Amino acid sequence: MNNTTYQPTKESLNTHPVPEWFEDAKFGVFIHWGLYSIPGFAPLGSLAETLKTDYDRAMLNYPYAEGYWNAIKDPNTPSAQYHKEKYGSMPYQGFKQMFIDGLKKWDPSAWAKIFSDAGAKYVVIVSKHHDGYCLWPTEVKNPHEQDWFSKRDIIGELAEAVRKEGMRFGIYYSGGIDWTFRRRISRTFMDYSFSTPGGDYPAYADAQVRELIERYHPDILWNDICWPTNQDAIPFVCLLL
């Protein structure tokens, strides 16, 4: 056990060793699950190839279902065509109730048992992806999308189940992108990578990550893309130590 006291500076935190359990873990499970899982659609192919052959529209043909909401904003994408055929004019927000209804069949203990039996030593789940929908009953309300969260505590229930099976638990959070705060279409990789919202978003993201750390005490905190401009991430690192 590391009993060293660290200071909230880069110099001090850079001396923190990688936890021994992580060095030994080798195999873990990363869960991408959310509203985008309902359509579960994305064009086939690789992102690298798409960037080479059609850079100007690469992120509209993003080969991951998590990009679905962005892709259906352009009527000429495969995702938009699929959406029209399958769901008509239903907005992306329509997937919320479908997701909630599906949770009636969800058994976090069964998931955790499968992961443990497979030899996993840790599990990381998406708490909020780029669509901004939260998989926990957050007290930090989204000012641009009402009730944009699960009232069932998916994060908390899975954390408990995973830890009962002797595994470590981690949380992913999309800090760099939230399409409820910045709704314009991202077409290129640069659009996508540098679309971090300003305005009221930095304070929102700050409060949510603090809430996740203080409520669930994750062994891993995985921030995606980047962090809101001019915000210092060091305080969050200190909360984890």
Image (tube, rainbow, N blue to C red):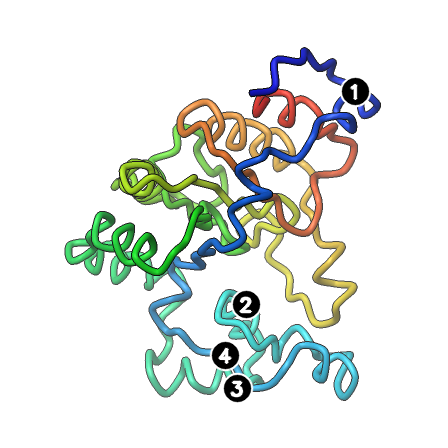
Distance of label 3 from label 4 (alpha carbons): 8 Å
Mark 2 belongs to which amino acid? Gly
Q: CA distance from mark 3 to mark 1?
A: 49 Å
Seen at 59% across and 22% down, the residue is: 241
Q: Residue lying furthest right in this view?
A: 11
Precedes in sequence: disc 3 or disc 4: 4
Q: Which x, y percent locates residue 195?
A: 71, 54
- The CA span between labels 1 and 4 is 43 Å
Asked if disc 1 and disc 4 are in contact, CB closer than 8 Å, the reply is no
Q: Earlier in the sequence, mark 3 or mark 2?
A: 2
Q: Nearer the viewer, mark 1 or mark 4?
A: 1
Asked if the residues shown at circle 2 and circle 4 are in contact, with their CB atoms under 8 angstroms apart, the answer is yes
User: Please, what is the three-letter code of the amino acid marked with disc 4?
Assistant: Ala
Q: Marks 3 and 1: CB-CB under 8 Å?
A: no
Q: Quadrant of residue 161?
A: top left
Q: Quadrant of the N terminus?
A: top right
Report the residue marked by disc 2: 67
Give neighbour class at mark 1: few <14, some 14-19, many 20+ (Cα, 10 Å): few
Q: CA distance from mark 3 to mark 2?
A: 12 Å
Report whether 180 appears left or right of 135: right
Horizontal and vertical percent position of residue 135: 37, 45
In the image, which is nearer the foreground, mark 3 or mark 1? 1
Residue corresponding to mark 3: 78
Residue highlighted by disc 1: 12
Q: Which residue is mark 4?
A: 42
Instruction: Give the amino acid type for the residue marked by disc 1 in the picture.
Output: Ser
The numbered mark, 3 or 1, whose residue comes first in the sequence reads 1
Mark 3: few, some, or many residues within 10 Å (few <14, many ≥20)? Answer: some
Given contact means CB atoms under 8 Å apart, are the residues at marks 3 and 2 in contact?
no
Front: mark 3 or 4? 4
Asked which quadrant contains residue 149, the reply is top left
